[in-house]
Image (tube, rainbow, N blue to C red):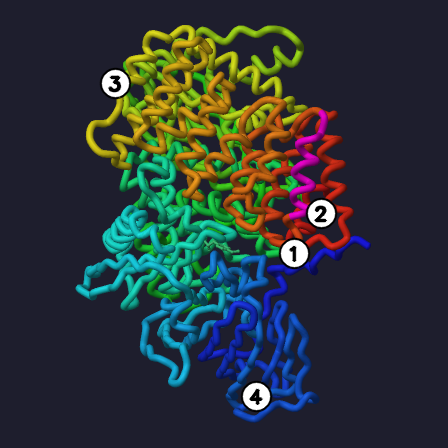
Amino acid sequence: MRSETAPAIRLEEYQPPAYRIDTVHLDVQLDPAATTVTATLSLARQAGTKAGTPLVLDGDELTLTGLKLNGEELGSQDFTASADRLEINAPPASPFELTITTQINPGANTKLMGLYRSSGTFCTQCEAEGFRRITYFLDRPDVLAVYTTRLEAPKAECPVLLANGNLIETGGVAGSDRHYAVWHDPFPKPAYLFALVAGDLAQVPDRFTTASGRDVELNIYVEHGKEGLCDWAMDSLKRSMRWDEQVFGREYDLEVFNIVAVSNFNMGAMENKGLNIFNDKYVLADPDTATDQDYANIEAVIAHEYFHNWTGNRITCRDWFQLCLKEGLTVFRDQEFSADMRSRPVKRIADVRLLKSHQFPEDAGPLAHPVRPRIYHEINNFYTATVYEKGAEVVRMLKTLLGDDSFRAGLDLYFDRHDGQATTIEAFLACFEEAAAIDLSRFALWYEQAGTPVVAVQSEYDPERQTFTVKLSQEIPPVPGQKSSKPAVIPLRFGLIGPNGEDMDLSAPEGATVSGDVLVLDKAHQEVTFRDVASRPVLSLLRGFSAPIRLSQELQPDELLFLAAQDNDPFNRWQAVQTLAMQDLVRLSSLIRRGDSGKPSEDVIRVMGSVLTDTSLDAALRAQALTLPSEADVAQEIGKDVDPDAIFAARRLLREAIALSHGSELLPLITSLAPAGAYSPDAEAVGKRALANRALHYYAASGDDDAARLVWDRFVAADNMTDRLAALTLLVHDHMAQEEAALDHYRKRHEASSLAMDKWFMTQATAPGDRTLDKVRALMKHPLYDSSNPNRVRSLLQSFATGNPTQFARADGAGFELVAESVLAIDKRNPQVASRLLTSFRSWRALDPQRSVLAESALLRISSCEDLSRDSRDIVDRTLQ
Ligand code: 0A1
Ligand code: ZN
């Protein structure tokens, strides 16, 4: 029999909790196989709850071993208990105390939710619903309590004992080898922010003085021997703390801020109050094992988790439908932080690339959902690019519409008014409405409607009347479960560029609200007329990607070339280069599909040449412009009847043509750009390495011996992981003669570093060519492959499924089969990792008929599994619907 779909939870059915929990005292006796948790909860009926209303607490795989009410053992007639529920039939009318004892087995917890062990360290993950795997509780974000946590464990095995808040007591347990620590967190919090860590870890200490002069102790805890890999994370933390004070006026509020890095973690990191737990991939770095991208990710994730202290912890979500309230806002904040730390345009390009490659396909496929969903079956499946990345775009649009000052005033009001509360998107928006005296009821549609709006643009210049008219229309393509949609409020940043390349000075146009350089499109169709326009301008629209939309703008090739060379907005300049390349790749793929041999456009080759040689441009920006749209980007643009082999061949053709035409410009870029001095992850050095490696990527396309030798030499001589991995990727993905030698060389050098070896698995899993599938199967048997480690599974299988379109979507279906088999195997251990992997099928309907039939049969095979987890059941049901 097929496993059941979990019941639907609906936003409209939200009910406040019947009981409050004011304080929680936890006593945790740590033991790998039998940990005892005694939770003492002080409870009270909420106003409006009838006396005698049963108290129903959530549980998940729990064993109840004791239960007292106001200190008295409860009789079996007074409650019912099962692994996932504890009901007290008739609680007292006045406030009461419940003492619950449970026994759990952290060593057997392979789901990595609740209390589990990662390489011998006890740690927890409670978001979204993991606390109920530790004790019975009202495990919902609108129940806020003050926690005191006492941890006890053998001192030799667990010298480090950590929980949320401030440390208030430590000591030895008389007559035993055990010791204890008591932590108190004065800030009321929901259970999902609870955390504890216990183990034998090294401590990397530091300090921070807040703006108001309070001294905060900072610590990063890591496995022994990894202390030297924490400098960048610590530096990022201190910069985040200062930046949040300066830019948002937010100060840290406890005496200590602890970070723990663990090697087994389902997601990136977790913002538990005062005790952030991280996937070690977002903490550990040195130049030899971490790339520039890793350094940037660490900076961003450290900042993200730290910023949650205000946006998420001090102010949390009323229910899980409001997840974007904390996530969208916090992603926006971390994006702004990174933009301030580095080049703003380059950061914006990277964020938009991520949005388009992850969120746009989600929004265009069967897993589409609004930024604030209205229904879910399994909340773990809603930690999505839509909630996070599109959620951040919505906050960014709010800032664009309101202007910097009103936006800040609205946020200040939000922090003042809702501190200590669990709240909603409505309450958030109300703060901006009040601060800016503006009606945001139409804007709020961004939270309600799924799908990416398509904005069509046509323009006309009338030389006689000196008018420039822009016709705009918007539409959201059909989305599952959303039959119709209303026009959204879309801020379009723009400029009209005159023949001299300068933005024209314009007076307010007719037909739309324009403030500064932002035009607000808020109707299905709108016509905007600019007067006194002396000559035909080129319209640069959606500057800085001011809204998460698809633009359908019929620009002539000469206009695109003009924008690529002249636009004052660096983002749109990059976008123009990308659009030119994209148009050519779409054209070439369709020719190749028909069996013709296409010839790349001279225009594109020329533009790429001018980017290569334009030293007035930032190196990082040049590297971004020279990066062709990915295979997945092109597939998305084509939209239906996709043949990944044709797209691959088109990209290869264009890459070779660029290499052939600009061979002489490439070599100097490769050799002369090495930043001087010791490795540094600063923006300038990163930009230089990116450009040199991009040039190498083209240079290698010639396939000749000189090129192969240069790539190998750079691989061997590299003094940092960025250059080493760039060269290794070329050797392996271009199947150069020294492919195997390079993989061996790398393995020997990095065998001891799990994070570096993840890259080794990933490089092989993403290699094009028919041999990859067998290679991936062989790597699954490699001694270093570990199916219980989420990072390792992601580095091999997730990167195969999402980063290797021609092999995942092989025309014989073997790629789909491999991923389906893996989903089924992993699902038994770790449903969250399995269901994530399963989302790689989300664009299956866009494939050509032969491939989509094979993808469907792999999905049906998963669906027919009898004991699928609710996580995977939810994804497979929605993907097939
Ligand atoms: N709140 C974290 C993300 C997170 C979500 C769920 C997790 O376990 C299932 C873990 C982390 C963040 O936004 O960083
Ligand atoms: Zn977050």
Q: Is residue 862 above or below residue 632?
A: below
Please report whichever mark, 1 or 4, sits nearer to the chain's N-terminal start.
4
How far apart are labels 4 and 2 at the CA level?
Answer: 42 Å
- The residue identified by callout 4 is 68
Please report whichever mark, 4 or 2, sits nearer to the chain's N-terminal start.
4
Tell me residue 572's x, y (percent): 38, 26
Magenta stretch bounds:
812-825
Q: Residues within 10 Å of mark 1 (few under 14, many from 20)?
A: some
How far apart are labels 1 and 2 at the CA level?
Answer: 11 Å
Q: Nearer the viewer, mark 1 or mark 3?
A: 3
Tell me residue 164's x, y (percent): 39, 68
Q: 433 and 768: which one is in front?
A: 768
Q: Is residue 339 above or below residue 84?
A: above
Residue 281 shows up from this direction = yes
Residue 823 is a magenta residue: yes
Q: Is residue 199 above or below residue 390?
A: below
Please report whichever mark, 1 or 3, sits nearer to the chain's N-terminal start.
1
Mark 1 and mark 2 in contact? Answer it, CB < 8 Å. yes
Tell me residue 755's x, y (percent): 43, 42
Please report whichever mark, 1 or 2, sits nearer to the chain's N-terminal start.
1
Mark 4 and mark 2 in contact? Answer it, CB < 8 Å. no
Q: Determine which quarter of the picture holds residue 154.
A: bottom left
- The residue identified by callout 3 is 672
Q: Residue at x 36, y 67 (%)?
A: 160
- The residue identified by callout 2 is 877
Mark 4 and mark 3 in contact? Answer it, CB < 8 Å. no
Tell me residue 742's x, y (percent): 44, 25
Q: 198 and 390: which one is in front?
A: 198
Q: Is residue 5 above or below residue 748?
A: below
Secondary structure beneath dot 2 equals helix
- The residue identified by callout 1 is 377
